[in-house]
């Protein structure tokens, strides 16, 4: 298991609600996928319920991330072609 601090990311939105995170991702991405809690993104477990939004924009991924004791964020991983292909092949697109 990987810690989020071990991979390069950019914070795009912080202290947000789940609705705000999803709206941000939908607005800024070409494709949106929903994954279940526990889904691994570059080895990092995503926490949440049944539906965690992840979007792709070019070669970047934007996703909702829960930092315990801190709140919800939208993070961006650049150059994530491998993860985008993994999402596309998993048929989780919405």
Image: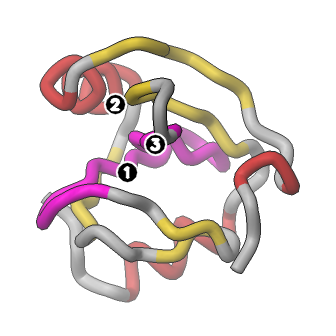
Start-end of magenta stretch: 48-67
60 vs 20, nearest the viewer:
20
Marks 1 and 3, how far apart in space?
10 Å
Q: Residue at x 53, y 66 (%)?
A: 84
53 vs 2, nearest the viewer:
2
**Please, what is the dominant secondary structure of the magenta stretch?**
strand
Identify the mark at residue 65; answer none if there is no mark: 3
Please tell me how many numbered marks the rendered image carries: 3
Q: Left of 53 or right of it: where is 79? A: right
Identify the mark at residue 25; answer none if there is no mark: 2
Q: Residue at x 75, y 37 (%)?
A: 9
The quarter of the picture where the N terminus appears is: bottom right
Q: Quadrant of residue 20?
A: top left
Q: Looking at the image, is 87 positioned above or below residue 7?
A: below
Q: Secondary structure at mark 3?
A: strand
Q: Left of 67 or right of it: where is 26? A: left
| Tag 1–tag 3 contact (CB < 8 Å) | no
- Residue with the mark numbered 1: 54
Marks 2 and 3, how far apart in space?
12 Å
| Tag 1–tag 2 contact (CB < 8 Å) | yes
Q: Looking at the image, is 33 positioned above or below residue 41?
A: above
In this rendering, the label closer to the viewer, 1 or 3: 3
Q: Residue at x 57, y 33 (%)?
A: 75
| Tag 2–tag 3 contact (CB < 8 Å) | no
The quarter of the picture where the C terminus appears is: bottom left
Q: Left of 3 or right of it: where is 33? A: left
Residue 40 in the magenta stretch? The answer is: no
């Amino acid at each position: 298991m990987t810690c989020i601090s071990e991979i390069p990311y950019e914070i795009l939105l912080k202290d947000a609600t789940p609705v705000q995170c999803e709206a941000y991702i939908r607005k800024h991405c070409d494709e949106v996928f929903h994954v279940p809690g526990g889904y691994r993104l570059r080895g990092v477990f995503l926490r949440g319920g049944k539906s965690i939004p992840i979007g792709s924009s070019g070669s970047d991924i934007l996703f909702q991330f829960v930092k315990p004791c801190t709140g919800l964020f939208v993070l961006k991983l650049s150059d994530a072609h491998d993860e985008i292909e993994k999402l596309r092949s998993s048929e989780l697109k919405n």
